Image (cartoon, rainbow, N blue to C red):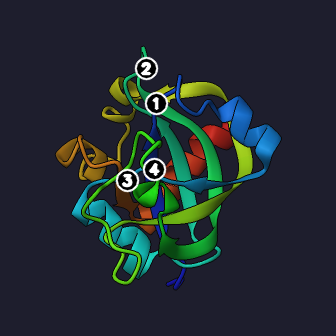
Amino acid sequence: MSSRKYWLMKAEPDVYPVEQWKKDKVTFWDGVRNYTARNFMRDQMKKGDGMFFYYSGGKPSGIMGVGEIAREGYPDHTAFDPKDVHFDPKSDHAKPTWYMVDVKFVKACKHILPLDFLKKVPGLKGMALFKYSRLSVQPVTEAEWGIIRRLIDTQ
């Protein structure tokens, strides 16, 4: 069993499209304001972990790309910027509340893997995505990672 972990990270297609990530190559994943998601980024994500880039709020929602964690959790600077949409006036530089990671682009999907399709794939029935639909950063099992990577690589 690998010590590498796998993740699914959500973004709105109009906020950060996969095409921009492909151009940027590496970007920071900021603006997460959920404690469970924050804890994953701060405490569990490691450099080299795999991640799926998931469009939420799109028509349809689904997996759009593959990446990996390029930098482990560090304080989310947008929490301290009053001009930023993710500003949190309670966040403290000495004891940051919010964290982010950097993610490196690996591959864009030729076609989105829609949520409705993923729900029908054998082996994905217990996926966190179906149980915790509002969680923006969530774990993916090694088995789920393998199934989805095969789907992406054969499309």
Query: How many other residues sit within 10 Å of disc 1, few (<14), some (14-19) or many (≥20)?
Result: some
Residue 54 visible? The answer is yes
Q: Earlier in the sequence, mark 4 or mark 2?
A: 4
Q: Which residue is mark 4?
A: 9
Q: Residues under labels 3 and 2: Cα distance?
A: 18 Å
Looking at the picture, tell me which residue is in the foreground, 105 or 91: 91
Which callout, 1 or 4, points to the residue nearer the camera? Answer: 1
Q: Are marks 1 and 2 in contact (CB under 8 Å)?
A: yes
Q: Nearer the viewer, residue 66 or 45?
A: 45
Residue 98 rendering spot, x and y as whole percentages: 36, 66
User: What residue lies at 56% left-to-right and 76% top-to-bottom?
Assistant: 72
- Mark 4 touches mark 2? (CB < 8 Å): no
Q: SS at mark 4?
A: strand
The type of residue carrying mark 1 is Glu
* Structural distance between the alpha carbons of marks 4 and 2: 14 Å
Left or right: 134 in relation to 142: left
Q: Which mark is residue 58?
A: 2
Q: Secondary structure at mark 2?
A: loop
If you read the primary sequence from the N terminus, does the residue marked by circle 3 or circle 2 appear first?
3
* Badge nearest the viewer, 1 or 2: 1
Give yes or no for contact between labels 4 and 3 (Cβ–Cβ under 8 Å): no
